Image: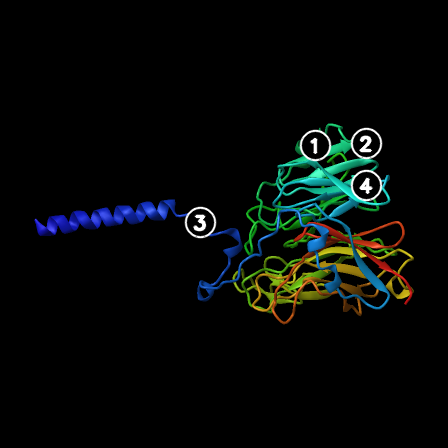
């Protein structure tokens, strides 16, 4: 009888264990690729502040810039703001990630006000083309024709034309129309590190404005969050995030130049300046891979990239790149949380990375208050810089000291 009871108890224990195993939630996506020896790591993505921050609570005076440059608060009240696009009338449109909103920001000459164009989308990004606002989420593409003059215009649903892959991880977008009039769209890897389940991921595409004539123009791109075209050569340059859980200092984020279409930029086998992946292996993993113009720091989250073409800044900034680095989470000592300039020859040689805006992070305590994300050049040559953490936009201007 005792043995029978013990046996029944074992069966119950096994059944309970199986039930727990079946109902236990999977680990979060950001833990994928984490080695067993880091199972107790306290590193985790930083929570965003998705509520309005008044201007009085933004320590703009902590920002440090080169002599003659000034940062000031341009607008607030747009939680989670990311990439921006400017319409012909001067209205600014911007997407968000977890909050799912698209904002319209209006400047009346004295103050900036904002409204929500659309809400409850899955990580929407925006672009402007010929007076139409394009909104692309993970699973939806909407076009708002003439929205600047008609704020209540109903969108045209273009989703079916773009054939969007469904996975969310790293599939949030930065979208933009290029000099050729085509819409450029990245589709990031659906994982931290993996061989993508289909060829739809880890690539950059371009489309005609109506979603037709899709081309894959780059592969092996893990997670680009910003790109721009060189003012002289018209070649595409883009940022790319390195994978997590391979150490504090490796692999670094990338700044890449696409000298022609069809190049392979290495993911998932080869990272940064020829670093072979620890988990996804193959012989000669970096053969045929286009290496970056420059590495941009490990886990620094380099985001928006902009070639400066204005006349406000000193001459040495003409055609220089500004890159916003939102800041690391998968690193014991935080990196990024700044804006840097990158000067390089048109063919990508002789790159030099220089700090431009610092002060979002206290180096002594590792505490940060802002996360710079994207850059937009204004007609007067000043730059707008979005802060995803505080939902604000800062204006950077220059006056000869």
Which quadrant of the structure image shows residue 103? top right
From the image, tell me which residue sits under label 1: 158
Asked whether disc 2 touches disc 1, contact meaning CB atoms under 8 Å apart, the reply is no
Please tell me which residue is depicted at 83% across the width and 31% down the height of the picture: 149
Mark nearer the N terminus (2 vs 4): 4
Crowd rating for badge 4 (residues with CA inside 10 Å; few <14, some 14–19, many 20+): some
Mark nearer the N terminus (2 vs 1): 2
From the image, tell me which residue sits under label 3: 26
Q: Is residue 259 above or below residue 208?
A: below
The Cα–Cα distance between marks 3 and 1, rounded to whole angstroms, is: 34 Å
In this rendering, position of residue 352 left or right of residue 297: right
Residue 273 horizontal/vertical position (percent): 67, 67
**Closer-to-camera residue (117/345):** 117
Residue 318 horizontal/vertical position (percent): 88, 61
Question: For the residues carrying marks 4 and 1, which lies nearer the camera in this image?
Answer: 4
**Closer-to-camera residue (358/190):** 358
The Cα–Cα distance between marks 2 and 4, rounded to whole angstroms, is: 12 Å
From the image, tell me which residue sits under label 2: 146
The Cα–Cα distance between marks 2 and 1, rounded to whole angstroms, is: 16 Å
């Amino acid at each position: 009888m005792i043995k029978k009871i013990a046996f029944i108890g074992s069966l119950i224990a096994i059944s309970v264990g199986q039930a727990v195993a079946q109902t236990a939630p999977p680990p979060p996506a950001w833990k994928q690729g984490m080695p067993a020896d880091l199972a107790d790591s306290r590193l985790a993505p930083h929570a965003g502040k998705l509520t309005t921050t008044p201007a009085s609570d933004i320590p703009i005076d902590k920002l440090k810039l080169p002599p003659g440059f000034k940062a000031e608060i341009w607008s607030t009240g747009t939680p989670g703001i990311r990439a921006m696009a400017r319409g012909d009338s001067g209205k600014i449109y911007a997407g968000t990630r977890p909050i799912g909103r698209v904002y319209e920001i209006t400047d009346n000459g004295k103050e900036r006000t904002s409204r929500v164009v659309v809400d409850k989308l899955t990580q929407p990004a925006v672009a402007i083309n010929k007076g139409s606002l394009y909104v692309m989420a993970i699973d939806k593409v909407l076009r708002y024709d003439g929205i600047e003059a008609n704020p209540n215009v109903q969108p045209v649903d273009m989703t079916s034309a773009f054939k969007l892959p469904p996975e969310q991880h790293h599939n949030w977008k930065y979208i933009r129309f290029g000099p050729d009039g085509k819409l450029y769209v990245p589709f990031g890897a659906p994982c931290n590190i993996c061989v993508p389940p289909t060829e739809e991921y880890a690539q950059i595409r371009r489309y005609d404005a109506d979603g037709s004539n899709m081309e894959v123009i780059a592969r092996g791109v893990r997670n680009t969050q910003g790109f721009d075209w060189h003012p002289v050569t018209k070649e595409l340059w883009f940022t790319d995030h390195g994978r997590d859980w391979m150490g504090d200092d490796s692999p670094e984020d990338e700044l890449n130049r696409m000298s022609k279409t069809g190049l392979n930029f290495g993911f998932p086998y080869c990272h940064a300046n020829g670093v072979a992946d620890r988990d996804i292996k193959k012989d000669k993993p970096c053969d045929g891979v286009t290496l970056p113009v420059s590495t941009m720091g490990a886990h620094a989250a380099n985001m928006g990239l902009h070639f400066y073409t204005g006349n406000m800044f000193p001459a040495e900034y003409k055609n220089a790149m500004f890159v916003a680095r939102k800041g690391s989470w998968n690193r014991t000592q935080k990196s990024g949380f700044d804006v840097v300039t990158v000067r390089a020859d048109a063919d990508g040689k002789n790159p030099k990375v220089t700090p431009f805006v610092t002060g979002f992070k206290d180096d002594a305590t590792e505490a940060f208050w802002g996360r710079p994300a994207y850059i937009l050049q204004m007609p007067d040559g000043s730059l707008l810089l979005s802060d995803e953490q505080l939902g604000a936009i800062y204006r950077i201007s220059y006056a000869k000291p």
